[in-house]
Image (cartoon, grey):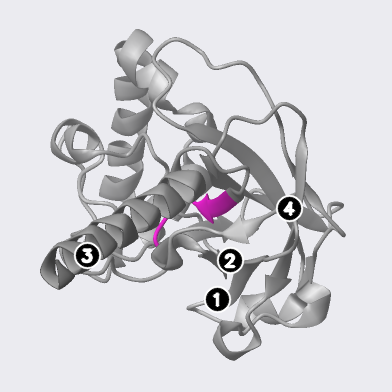
Amino acid sequence: MNKIFLLLAVMGGLLFTSCQEDSIMVFGSDHYIYFDKFWKDASYPGTEKADSTEVTFFFVGEDENSTNAELIVVLAGRQLEHDLDFKLRVVPELTTALPEEYTLKDKYTFHARPVQEGDTRFQDTIQIQLNKSARLDTMSAGYRLVLEVVPDENVKPGQYERARSVIRIVKDPVRPEWWNSEVDIYLLGAYSATKYKLFLENVPGASELDKEMIEQRPDEARKLVLEFKKWLQQNPSEDEFGPIEVPV
């Protein structure tokens, strides 16, 4: 009888635990917010590597004093019926940016919207204001701003490896998303900040090269790169990999 009672007690405890987990993970009203990018390598068995959001002031006009870093935030929990406000704060021990080099809002908003066909998760995009600083011109590696989600009664930080976001601010242009392996092979060759900067500074219209041009107007993209190749022949240049060349 005692053994039967003990078995029933254990089973009851497991059921109670299961109900508790279901109430948090499936039926609960808690909302968790985390960033799309990993600020540190994922814990085993995950394989995701730490990544940062790079922002440059290279394209900011002389009469402009700020630019924005766009961060994708992800929501875990029940679908929103109303917009959800949340706060961010600086992680001082990981941040090298000075207080005047960024401006945080009092709150950010994760917007409620209907689920669209093909959606696999709830996500939104927020903007972090970065302010121009003269010292950036003297810093080849730039500086870093690290933010994290502030827990409160409405929001909790999500997955630890994505509860923070690393923003790296640099003076030179950063690798655009369209510069992929195919661009490496067929157009501009291996990416370097020096190569991209020279391309932008010395080829009229180079700043218009983007994914849409490469896919829809490849002849125009090729023409821009050929102009760059001609410029390099007249002005041999080097980057950290050696002489700058383009394969087109």
Circle nearer the N terminus (2, 3): 3
From the image, state whether disc 2 or disc 4 is nearer to you: 4
- Mark 3 belongs to which amino acid? Phe
Disc 2 marks which amino acid? Answer: Lys
Q: Residues within 10 Å of mark 2 (few under 14, many from 20)?
A: many
Considering only order in the chain, which callout, 1 or 2, is on the residue closer to the N terminus?
1
Mark-to-mark CA distance, 2 and 3: 70 Å
Q: Mark 1 to mark 4: distance in Å?
A: 35 Å
Q: Find disc 1 in the rendering and name its residue.
A: 142
- Label whose residue precedes the other's in the sequence (1 or 4): 1
- Give the amino acid at mark 4: Asn
Q: Position of residue 42 (x, y in %)?
A: 28, 65
79 w.r.t. 168: above or below: above
Estimate the x, y position of residue 200 in percent, counting from the top left: 49, 44
Q: Is residue 90 above or below residue 216?
A: below
Relative depth, front residue between 236 and 189: 189
Q: Residue at x 14, y 62 (%)?
A: 4
Q: Which residue is mark 3?
A: 5
Which residue is the site of mark 2? 171
